[in-house]
Image (spheres, rainbow, N blue to C red):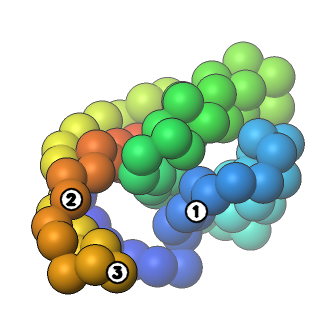
Amino acid sequence: MTEDNDNTVYIGSKPAMSYVLAVVTQFNDGQDQVHIKARGKAISTAVDVAEIVRNRFIEEAAVEDIDIGTDTIDTDEGDEMNLSSIHIDLAK
């Protein structure tokens, strides 16, 4: 999996269609591959974004790779917390 921030969409707390627009814009700007990344509660939104892009907007887009994992983050209290993450690669 390549790490290129020019074609990476980070999923947060906005509505899914905001991120769908970002992914479609990346493809329309000539990208052959777009990376969708999310952590924690945003994982379900990331999956929704990938499926909406594939089924409604860019039907030739396919899921090339899905990588799941756990990130360890430091809390404000100084503790460590595990947070699930997902990386979805869509390619045309």
In this view, which residue lies farthest toward the top?
55
User: Tag 1 or tag 3, which sits nearer the N-term?
Assistant: 1
Quadrant into which the N terminus falls: bottom left
On the image, the x and y values in percent for residue 72 come to 16, 63
The numbered dot on residue 22 is none
Q: Is residue 3 above or below residue 64?
A: below
User: Tag 1 or tag 2, which sits nearer the N-term?
Assistant: 1
Judge by depth and name the residue closer to the eye, 82 or 59: 82
**Regarding mark 2 in the picture, which secondary structure is present there?**
strand
Report the Cα–Cα distance between label 3 and label 2: 10 Å
The numbered dot on residue 81 is 2
Q: Is residue 28 visible?
A: no
Quickly name the residue at label 3. 76
Mark 3 or 2, which is nearer the eye? 3
Q: Which residue lies at the image location 82% right of the left edge and 45% below the top edge?
A: 15
Say left or right for 63 vs 92: left
**Regarding mark 3 in the picture, which secondary structure is present there?**
loop
Q: Which residue lies at the image location 46% right of the left edge and 52% below the top edge?
A: 38
Judge by depth and name the residue closer to the eye, 79 or 22: 79
Task: Specify the amino acid type for callout 3.
Answer: Asp
On the image, the x and y values in percent for residue 28 come to 77, 58
Quickly name the residue at label 1. 9
Asked if the residue at tag 1 contacts the one at tag 3, i.e. Cβ–Cβ closer than 8 Å, the answer is: no
Task: Specify the amino acid type for callout 2.
Answer: Met
Label 1: how many residues lie within 10 Å, few (<14), some (14-19) or many (20+)?
A: many
